[in-house]
Image (cartoon, helix red, strand yellow):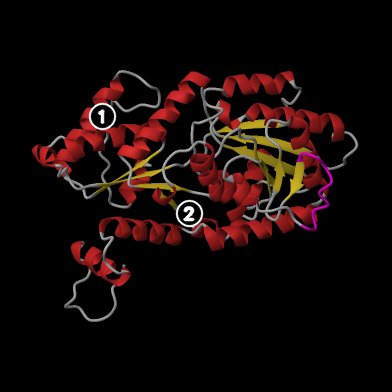
C-alpha cells in the first residue's frame, strides 16, 4: 500500500514493533501507538484487521483514560471504529488460542469500540449472532468498494496472460488468486484439479489448465503436492502479481477454496472482469454469489448454481470438481454468470459508494445531534472546503 499512499499524497507513519504474530513486542507497539495518539489528538480512530485492531484499540483505551480529567469521569473525547474484513474465530488457530482471541474481541467491543463495521450480511450474522461480539446497535454494514475503472476495458486485455502462458483460445484456463496460506486451502484446489484430470481429462476434448496466482509460506509444499498429483504440466505457479487488470481477463474461471472469508476481493475483482466464479460457501462469499438460480438445475448435492456464481460446500474436493465440470462444459453458463457478476459489482462495490458510506458513518459519530445537511456543513467547514458564507450547496 506504500506506493498507493504516496500517489494520493499520504505519508504513512510506521510502527515497527507491530507484526503479524503475537509476541512481547506487541506491548511496545501499543505504547508507541498510544504516544502517537497523545501527540496527534485525533477526533476519531479507525482500526482494521484482528492484530492491528487489538493494538490500536488498547492504545485508544489508554489514550481515553490516562488523563487527569478521567478522575472527574471526563476522559479524552475520541471515537473508535473497527472494521472486520474477516475474522479469526475459526480455521486459523487451535481451540485455546481461538477462545482467547474471541474473549479479547468481546471485551474490546464493549470497552473501546463505538462502531463495528462489517462488510457483508453474512459476516454480521457470524460475528454478532454466532460469536456474540458487540451489540446490534454498534454495527454498520459497509461493503467493500474498488476503483472499477481499471477493469472497464477488460476484453482488450483478454490475451495478455494467455499469450504469456501460451494458452490456446480453445483451452479453458482456471485460476485461483490469493495468499498461499492454510486458510485459503489451496490444497483443495489442487485435489479438485487432479480429480478433474482423472475423470474428464480424456473424455473431454477441451483442455483445462490451472494457474495459482499469489505467494506465501506454503508455495513449496503446494508445488510438491502438484507434482505428486501428476499436475506438473497442468498447473502453473505464477507468484505474486500486481497486474490484476491484465491477468483476470485471461482466466475463463476463477476459483476460491477458502475455509474462512470476510468478503474476498478476489471474487469482486473477478466479477468486475466478467469472469465466472466457483467458490466455497463461507463468510461473505454467500452474499456475493447470491441465492440459488431458478434456472440452475440444482440437483447435485454440494454444488449450487447461484445467480452470480457456483457455490460448493467447503473442504470437499469432489464437490468442487463437479462444480468445475459444470462450468467447463457450459460456456453459455460462464458468460451468463460473468455478466451478472459484473452488473452486481458495478451497482454495489464502487469506490465512490464506499467513500460516501464511510464519510456518512464518521459524520454520524462526530456530530450525532445535527441533521444530515448540518453535519456536512460542519465537516466541510472544518476541513476548509466549505463555509456558510459561500453560496451553493456543500460539495464533499
Residue at the location (66% across, 36% down)? Answer: 211
Give how far across and how far down residue 257 sits, in percent: 64, 35
- Picture quarter with the C terminus: bottom left
Which quadrant of the view contains residue 183? top right
- Sort mark 1 into few (<14), some (14-19) or many (20+) by Cα contacts within 10 Å: many
Tell me the distance, in whole angstroms, between the alpha carbons under discs 1 and 2. 31 Å
Q: Which of the two labelled residues, at mark 1 and mark 2, occupies the earlier sequence position?
A: 1
Does residue 250 sit above or below 30 in this rendering? below
> Within the magenta stretch, is there residue 120?
no
Horizontal arrangement in the rendering, residue 277 relative to residue 394 (left or right): right
Residue at the location (36% across, 33% down)? Answer: 107
Horizontal arrangement in the rendering, residue 73 relative to residue 88 (left or right): left
Q: Residue at label 1?
A: 30
Which quadrant of the view contains residue 316? top right
Q: Which residue range is magenta in the image? A: 294-302
The residue furthest front is 72
Residue at the location (61% across, 62% down)? Answer: 343
Task: Report helix, strand or loop for mark 1.
Answer: helix
Does residue 374 sit above or below 263 in this rendering? below
Does residue 263 sit above or below 368 in this rendering? above
Q: How many labels does the image show?
A: 2
Task: Report helix, strand or loop for mark 2.
Answer: loop
- Picture quarter with the N terminus: top left
Nearer to us of marks 1 and 2 is 1
Residue at the location (66% across, 46% down)? Answer: 251
Does the CB distance between marks 1 and 2 fall below 8 Å? Answer: no
Q: Residue at label 2?
A: 146
Q: Which of 240 and 67 is in front in this view?
A: 67
Horizontal arrangement in the rendering, residue 111 relative to residue 384 (left or right): right
> Within the magenta stretch, is there residue 300?
yes
- Using the image, tell me which numbered label, if any, was put on residue 380: none
Amino acid at each position: 500500500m506504500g506506493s498507493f499512499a504516496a500517489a494520493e499524497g499520504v505519508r504513512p507513519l510506521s510502527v515497527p514493533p507491530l507484526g503479524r504474530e503475537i509476541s512481547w513486542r506487541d506491548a511496545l507497539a501499543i505504547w508507541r501507538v498510544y504516544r502517537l495518539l497523545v501527540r496527534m489528538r485525533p477526533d476519531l480512530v479507525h482500526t482494521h484487521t484482528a492484530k492491528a485492531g487489538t493494538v490500536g484499540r488498547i492504545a485508544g483505551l489508554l489514550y481515553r483514560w490516562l488523563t487527569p480529567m478521567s478522575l472527574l469521569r471526563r476522559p479524552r473525547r475520541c471515537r473508535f471504529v473497527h472494521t472486520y474484513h474477516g475474522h479469526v474465530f475459526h480455521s486459523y488457530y487451535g481451540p485455546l488460542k481461538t477462545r482467547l482471541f474471541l474473549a479479547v474481541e468481546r471485551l474490546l467491543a464493549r470497552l473501546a469500540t463505538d462502531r463495528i463495521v462489517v462488510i457483508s450480511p453474512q459476516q454480521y450474522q457470524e460475528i454478532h449472532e454466532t460469536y456474540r461480539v458487540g451489540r446490534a446497535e454498534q454495527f454498520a454494514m459497509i461493503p467493500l468498494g474498488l476503483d472499477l475503472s481499471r477493469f472497464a476495458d477488460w476484453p482488450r486485455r483478454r490475451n495478455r496472460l494467455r499469450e504469456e502462458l501460451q494458452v490456446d483460445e480453445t483451452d479453458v484456463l482456471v485460476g485461483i488468486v490469493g495468499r498461499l496460506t492454510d486458510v485459503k486451502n489451496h490444497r483443495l484446489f489442487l485435489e479438485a484439479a487432479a480429480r478433474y484430470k482423472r475423470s474428464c481429462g480424456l473424455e473431454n476434448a477441451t483442455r483445462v489448465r490451472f494457474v495459482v496466482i499469489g505467494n506465501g509460506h506454503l508455495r513449496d509444499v503446494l508445488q510438491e503436492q502438484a507434482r505428486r498429483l501428476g499436475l506438473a504440466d497442468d498447473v502453473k505457479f505464477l507468484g505474486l502479481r500486481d497486474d490484476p487488470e491484465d491477468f483476470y481477463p485471461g482466466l475463463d474461471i476463477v476459483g476460491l477454496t477458502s475455509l474462512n472469508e470476510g468478503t474476498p476481493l478476489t471474487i469482486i475483482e473477478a466479477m468486475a472482469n466478467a469472469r465466472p466464479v466457483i467458490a466455497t460457501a463461507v463468510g461473505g462469499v454467500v452474499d456475493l454469489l447470491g441465492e440459488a438460480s431458478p434456472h440452475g438445475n440444482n440437483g447435485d448435492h454440494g454444488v449450487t448454481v447461484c445467480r452470480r456464481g457456483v457455490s460448493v460446500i467447503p473442504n470437499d474436493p469432489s464437490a468442487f470438481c463437479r462444480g468445475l465440470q459444470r462450468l467447463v462444459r457450459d460456456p453459455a453458463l460462464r458468460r451468463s454468470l460473468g455478466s451478472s457478476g459484473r452488473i452486481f459489482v458495478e451497482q454495489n462495490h464502487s469506490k465512490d459508494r464506499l467513500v460516501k458510506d464511510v464519510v456518512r458513518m464518521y459524520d454520524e459519530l462526530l456530530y450525532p445531534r445535527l441533521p444530515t445537511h448540518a453535519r456536512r456543513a460542519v465537516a466541510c467547514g472544518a476541513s476548509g472546503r466549505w463555509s456558510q458564507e459561500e453560496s451553493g450547496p456543500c460539495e464533499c
